[in-house]
Image (spheres, rainbow, N blue to C red):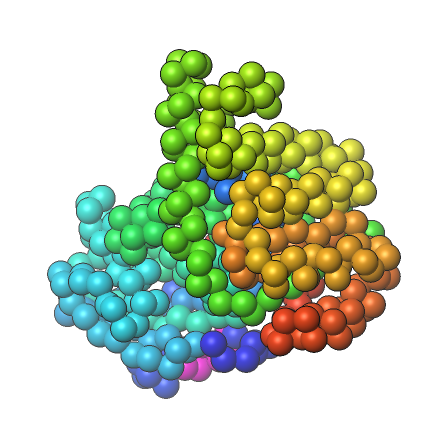
């Protein structure tokens, strides 16, 4: 990925004009997200509390009439053209598959996109970092098609289509959280989402005292995909066992902490501790929502810390690099909470830091982390922003 630029909109508009010799008809963007608390709960029909971050994927587009899609990626400096009727997986340019997936999903749902389009795509959401650049790409493309072809699809339906594109076409069995946040987030708010009912609430995020600070470990997430599949399977096995004794249990969302303790001896290792993380994490999200509503940022930070310990020791998806970032953070006065965010085994941590402590926090991370890991971190102080929109 290229270095971040300060004015992505102008850059991409100019790029579009250079490549396609005309102004784009539609220009949209969708944000990445950071999950404040509620990790590995979404695919268990649980609760999550993410926010959209002020880093976005932009799509400039115009219609065609020949049934082809012509797409230029500013980040990868690659141009691809294909027929809308030939949507095969691209094994070399994986970013194209997210666009093809959205297109395939629209076609399956009966929405007319067969005339084709020109697209220029680019943005400053860090790639492969657990900040949902893929969901931001899917939502920005889906919203672009909706506008470009006058399809009249509501954003909540676009969220469903974008998730289906990643699940069915790209082949990543992600939950709904990432696309939901990229589509429906609200400025200055976190998004409390019930992944079972899809009911959601925008929770005011009072950042007068604190900043949300994201640290990118820059550790390649080589184990994340295989571990993700394994953890999902372990959770499903836990549900199967619990259902024998609690017939109403269909997902771990249906299990309370007391329920789990009563059936604990029925669950072999590591099934029990995997379920233990998910069940306790759901409760932490509920407690976190209450803490934000009453303005208790200290309590929210404590819950973040508890979440990381659970992810590390029960769900076992942390790594030495993420633990290093968390340990450094917790040794800085004014850091209220620090935890890994995303699938784990690399990617990012999210930190709740009092504003006056942010400079020393940055200094400590930049000084200590490279010595401990040999990697250079990146730090993003982020605001909570709105979801997908027309630029």
Residue 74 in view: yes
Residue situated in front as seen by the camera: 141 or 344: 344
Question: Measuring 78% from the left and 33% from the top, which residue is drawn there?
Answer: 294
Question: Measuring 18% from the left and 61% from the top, which residue is drawn there?
Answer: 87
In the image, is 289 to the left or to the right of 330? left
Residue 152 in view: no
Whether residue 235 is situated above or below residue 382 in the rendered picture: above
In the image, is 304 to the left or to the right of 277? right
Question: Measuring 54% from the left and 61% from the top, which residue is drawn there?
Answer: 347
Based on the picture, tell me whether residue 43 belongs to the magenta stretch: no
Magenta segment: 9-15
**Residue 144 image position (x, y, % from top left):** 36, 59
Question: Measuring 62% from the left and 76% from the top, which residue is drawn there?
Answer: 374
Where, by quadrant of the figure, is residue 309 drawn?
top right
**Residue 2 image position (x, y, % from top left):** 50, 80
**Residue 236 image position (x, y, % from top left):** 39, 33
């Amino acid at each position: 990925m290229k270095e971040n630029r300060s004015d992505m909109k102008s850059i991409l508009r100019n790029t579009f004009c250079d490549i396609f010799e005309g102004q784009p008809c539609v220009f949209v963007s969708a944000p990445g997200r950071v999950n404040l608390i509620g990790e590995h709960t979404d695919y268990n029909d649980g609760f999550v509390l993410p926010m959209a971050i002020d880093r976005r994927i932009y799509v400039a587009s115009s219609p065609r009439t020949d049934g082809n899609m012509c797409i230029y990626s500013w980040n990868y400096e690659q141009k691809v053209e294909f027929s809308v009727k030939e949507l095969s997986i691209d094994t070399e340019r994986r970013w194209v598959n997210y666009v093809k997936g959205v297109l395939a999903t629209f076609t399956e749902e009966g929405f007319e996109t067969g005339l084709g389009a020109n697209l220029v795509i680019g943005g400053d959401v860090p790639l492969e970092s657990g900040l949902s650049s893929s969901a931001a790409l899917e939502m920005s493309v889906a919203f672009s098609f909706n506008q470009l072809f006058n399809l009249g699809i509501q954003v909540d339906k676009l969220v469903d289509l974008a998730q289906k594109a990643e699940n069915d076409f790209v082949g990543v069995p992600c939950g709904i959280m990432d696309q939901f946040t990229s589509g429906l987030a609200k400025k200055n708010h976190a998004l409390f989402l019930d992944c079972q009912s899809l009911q959601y609430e925008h929770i005011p995020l009072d950042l007068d005292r604190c900043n949300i600070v994201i640290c990118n470990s820059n550790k390649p997430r080589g184990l994340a995909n295989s571990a993700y599949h394994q953890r999902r399977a372990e959770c499903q096995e836990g549900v199967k066992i619990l259902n024998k004794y609690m017939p109403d249990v269909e997902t771990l969302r249906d299990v309370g902490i007391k329920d789990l303790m009563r059936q604990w001896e029925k669950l072999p290792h590591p099934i029990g501790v995997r379920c233990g993380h998910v069940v306790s994490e759901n409760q932490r999200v509920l407690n976190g929502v209450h803490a934000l509503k009453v303005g208790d940022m200290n309590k929210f930070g404590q819950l973040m810390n508890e979440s990381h310990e659970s992810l590390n020791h029960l769900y076992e998806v942390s790594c030495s690099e993420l633990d290093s970032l968390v340990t450094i953070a917790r040794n800085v006065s004014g850091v209220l909470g620090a935890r890994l965010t995303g699938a784990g085994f690399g990617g990012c941590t999210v930190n709740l830091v009092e504003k006056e402590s942010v400079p020393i926090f940055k200094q400590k991370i930049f000084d200590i982390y490279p010595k401990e890991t040999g990697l250079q971190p990146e730090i993003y102080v982020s605001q909570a922003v709105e979801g997908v929109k027309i630029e």
